[in-house]
Amino acid sequence: MEKWRLLAPGPTPVPQNVLNEMALPIIHHRAPGYKAIFKKVSEDLKYVFQTENDVIVFASSGTGAMEASVSNSFCKGDKVLVVRGGKFGERWGEISEAYGLNPVYIDVKWGNAVKVEDVKDALNKNPDIRGILIQASETSTGVKHPVKEIAQLVKENDNCIMIVDGITGVGVFNIEPDNWGIDILVSGAQKAFMLPPGLAFASVSEKAWKFMERSDLPKYYFDFKKERKNLKKNQNAYTPAVSLIIGLSKVLDMIKEEGLENVFKRHSILAKATREAVKALGLKLFAPDSPSESVTAVLAPEGIDAQDIVKLFREDHKITIAGGQGEAKGKIFRLSHIGFFDKFDIITAISGLELALKKLGYNFEMGKGVGKALEIFSNEI
Amino acid sequence: MEKWRLLAPGPTPVPQNVLNEMALPIIHHRAPGYKAIFKKVSEDLKYVFQTENDVIVFASSGTGAMEASVSNSFCKGDKVLVVRGGKFGERWGEISEAYGLNPVYIDVKWGNAVKVEDVKDALNKNPDIRGILIQASETSTGVKHPVKEIAQLVKENDNCIMIVDGITGVGVFNIEPDNWGIDILVSGAQKAFMLPPGLAFASVSEKAWKFMERSDLPKYYFDFKKERKNLKKNQNAYTPAVSLIIGLSKVLDMIKEEGLENVFKRHSILAKATREAVKALGLKLFAPDSPSESVTAVLAPEGIDAQDIVKLFREDHKITIAGGQGEAKGKIFRLSHIGFFDKFDIITAISGLELALKKLGYNFEMGKGVGKALEIFSNEI
């Protein structure tokens, strides 16, 4: 029997009713029926993004919307501040360099959140910084950055915009772009939106639209202004990923029905249970001080390769979890709780972990981790 | 009863067994199971593209691969020859201009194919042209351009590459990139590949890879060199559209089973039957001299708005066909026969057309069109 389970931070599990909806006969993207769906989806996205601003949709992975945020907002040589504390922070830097921007880096030790003070200092030293590029949740390290506090630093500054990669943040924990002053907030289909990969989203503030009037960088497919114009006609500039938009309509209904606050609460409890269970097994968190509710990164015990844990999950238990990326490879493994997850998925993850650790010769009392998670669920749900 | 039929040139109908396959639980793109599928898909794409070269896959609509062909191959100010005889020819021009290239245009009357002589003249007048940008099949007009003959003009010229938008060409009629000297051949999921939109493909020749070493235009998500590097590890640089790749694996099996020559023959017969049926009704083809096997563009009869025909198809018969785009809007309607189409789909299309024409007061003998199509099927299948 091949019963596979996907407990990785993206792609995340897709509810079967959504998969079924996407398996209905395909419809044409210029037909009125589709336009009504896209109109509804555009409105519902605002609810999940907690914004009054337009949310633009691209047919691409999340990286496409990250690139669009840079190529649409800036001019060659513009100075931007890049918070680099993981693989996705590095990606902001790579994109900025690809477009000939002038990035100022704040290098943060992997597993740590950036200090607001350090951002403040960098802004003071470089008053010509035109944008801050940061992750709400750095998926590679399981760290949550203090984007609210950082956004405040530039909220009243007309010459600097705040761009947040919320790919594993939006729909996981509270991010309020309009209230906090986040000008572009990016996300993607295959995380809290519970869909297969292939859609990228970005909400854009009026301040950012002004930057886009000035931007002189080349772009074509990822063109926010062109998409905004088409959005008014309830369509995309280019052929949209129709089946994913159909699925999106369905998952947005699910999120609205659960209620965004309940969605956040669920993620928060699942994350807490995961962290506490792992600690009860004597393991250490990779990001103990500012953990994200989307994914829990765990240091492998002394003498055990984290990749062996990932491998045992796959081979013995048919569970896909994530290992470390870049410099964290072999050191950490990552348990996800983004999207279509409930308490029994966490129990499954911790059970798999206990079985793997036992096989690898790690010394602990079996059931300790699962027991701790159950205790938390019993108190908090 | 709502029995909808999709007879438009993209998205095209997706076989139900493929939709079902894509509705299986989602898998992780870094897991070994997925990599085996992607490896197989990459090989099978070469079969459909009729090439020994790598075929790169992006998660985007086809336009993404068009943009990539430009942004990866050229330098700012490079002179390119753009064949502009429809909406997609215009798109080549827009992309070239967005990236600061220096396009030389050959403007072709909509509905006509470019003359090889005109391309030859332009190349002679501009020996510094670095690339030719053209459609194999101009979907907006139903025209097939003589890409084989044009490719010959630059095949032996190391300083000029031939880039062909084969979005409605690949898998529809014969295009031989390696033999003819097409350096980049682009296609997309939602045409002959019978999938929902969201994947773009491009085969790249060794000559084009050399151009890519020199290119200085900014790019990040659409980066051929990065994808080629990842392809060697049977993966994409960024999160792929997993469910569409699963579907792709299935449709490539279907194409291999039918055999590419039979696929071409089927399209050719369906296209011929459509053209002859339309002519039997006394209507005129928009592209009589060089019609594409992917889509048949038809001029609405004198005094009838083509959009009214499209509307009747939709409202009376629940059939989605395409109208004209740009300057052809209101003048033409387009009947598609790309991908998952058989003879009865053509009979349905012609029947719908006859019903619509009758309602709009056009004078003809009912059954003439369908009869002509049946005659062709009876002789040729």
Image (spheres, coloured by chain):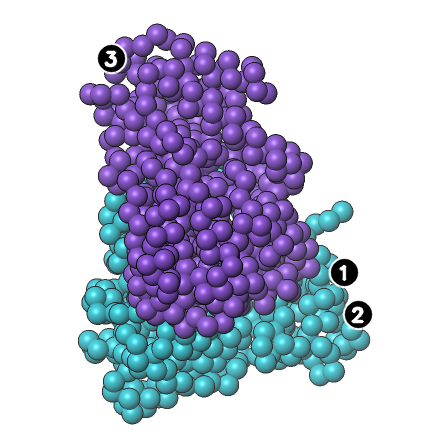
Chain colours: A purple, B cyan
Numbered tag placed on residue A361 in the rendering: 3
Chain of the residue under the numbered disc 3 shown in the image: A
- Give the x, y percent position of residue A10: 43, 38
In the picture provided, is B298 more to the left or to the right than B18?
right
Residue at disc 3, secondary structure: loop
Numbered tag placed on residue A195 in the rendering: none
Calculate the distance from the C-alpha at mark 1 to the C-alpha at mark 3: 70 Å
- Give the x, y percent position of residue A106: 31, 50
Give the amino acid type for the residue marked by disc 1 in the picture: Asp
- Give the x, y percent position of residue B208: 25, 67
Residue positioned 56% across, 63% down in the render: A206
Which of discs 2 and 1 lies nearer the camera? The answer is 1
Q: Which is more N-terminal, label 1 or label 2?
A: 1
Callout 2: few (<14), some (14-19), or many (20+) C-alpha neighbours within 10 Å?
few
Residue positioned 38% across, 20% down in the render: A278
Q: Are marks 1 and 3 in contact (CB under 8 Å)?
A: no
Name the residue carrying label 2.
B359
Residue positioned 24% across, 39% down in the render: A327
Calculate the distance from the C-alpha at mark 2 to the C-alpha at mark 1: 10 Å
Which of discs 2 and 3 lies nearer the camera? The answer is 3
Count the labels in the image.
3
Chain of the residue under the numbered disc 2 shown in the image: B
Residue positioned 20% across, 21% down in the render: A303
Residue at disc 2, secondary structure: helix
Q: Quadrant of residue B357?
A: bottom right
Chain of the residue under the numbered disc 1 shown in the image: B
Give the amino acid type for the residue marked by disc 3 in the picture: Gly
Q: Is residue A11 among the parts visible in the rendering?
A: yes
Calculate the distance from the C-alpha at mark 2 to the C-alpha at mark 3: 80 Å
